[in-house]
Image (tube, rainbow, N blue to C red):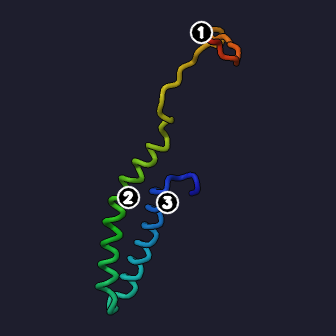
Amino acid sequence: MSNEPREVQRLERLKINANKYMKLIEENPDSDQMKLWSARLQDMLRGIELLVHEAAAAKVKAEQKDGGVHIKVPAAHFELKSDTPSVAE
C-alpha cells in the first residue's frame, strides 16, 4: 500500500469506512442514529464515485515517464577549454 498513489489509498480507506456504516445500518435498523448514518453513508458513496476517477488518474500519472527532452550527445563533439578567461584586445 505504501507504493500506491495517495488517491488510491484514500479510496481504499473510504471503502472500508463505507462498509462499516453499511454493516452498522444493517445491524441496527431501528436506531435513533439511522438518519445520521444513512446521510454519512450517502456522502461516502459520493466520495467513492469521485475518488475512483482520481485514483485512476493518479495511477496513470505515476506510470508516465518524467517529462522533458533527453538528447544524447556524443562526448567527441566537445572540447575542454582552459579555466582562465582570455582578454580581447
Quadrant housing the N terminus: bottom right
Number of other residues with Cα within 10 Å of mark 3, as a class: few under 14, some 14 to 19, many 20 or more: some
Number of other residues with Cα within 10 Å of mark 1, as a class: few under 14, some 14 to 19, many 20 or more: few
Place of residue 7 in the rendered image (x, y in percent of width and height, measured from the top left): 45, 56
Of tags 3 and 1, which is closer to the observer?
A: 1
Q: In the picture shown, does residue 31 fall above or below 82? A: below
Mark 2 in CB contact with mark 1 (< 8 angstroms): no
Of tags 2 and 1, which is closer to the observer?
A: 1
Q: Which residue is mark 2?
A: 51
| Type of the residue with mark 2 | Leu
- How far is mark 3 from mark 1, CA to CA? 63 Å
Disc sitting over residue 70 in the figure: none
Q: In the picture shown, does residue 37 fall above or below 81? A: below
| Type of the residue with mark 3 | Gln
Q: In the picture shown, does residue 70 fall above or below 88? A: below
Q: Residue at x 32, y 86 (%)?
A: 34
Outermost residue on the top side: it is 89
**Of pointers 3 and 1, the one earlier in the residue sequence:** 3
Q: Residue at x 44, y 76 (%)?
A: 20
Number of other residues with Cα within 10 Å of mark 2, as a class: few under 14, some 14 to 19, many 20 or more: some
Disc sitting over residue 9 in the figure: 3
Q: Residue at x 36, y 63 (%)?
A: 48
Quadrant housing the C terminus: top right
Q: Residue at x 50, y 53 (%)?
A: 5
Place of residue 40 in the rendered image (x, y in percent of width and height, measured from the top left): 34, 77
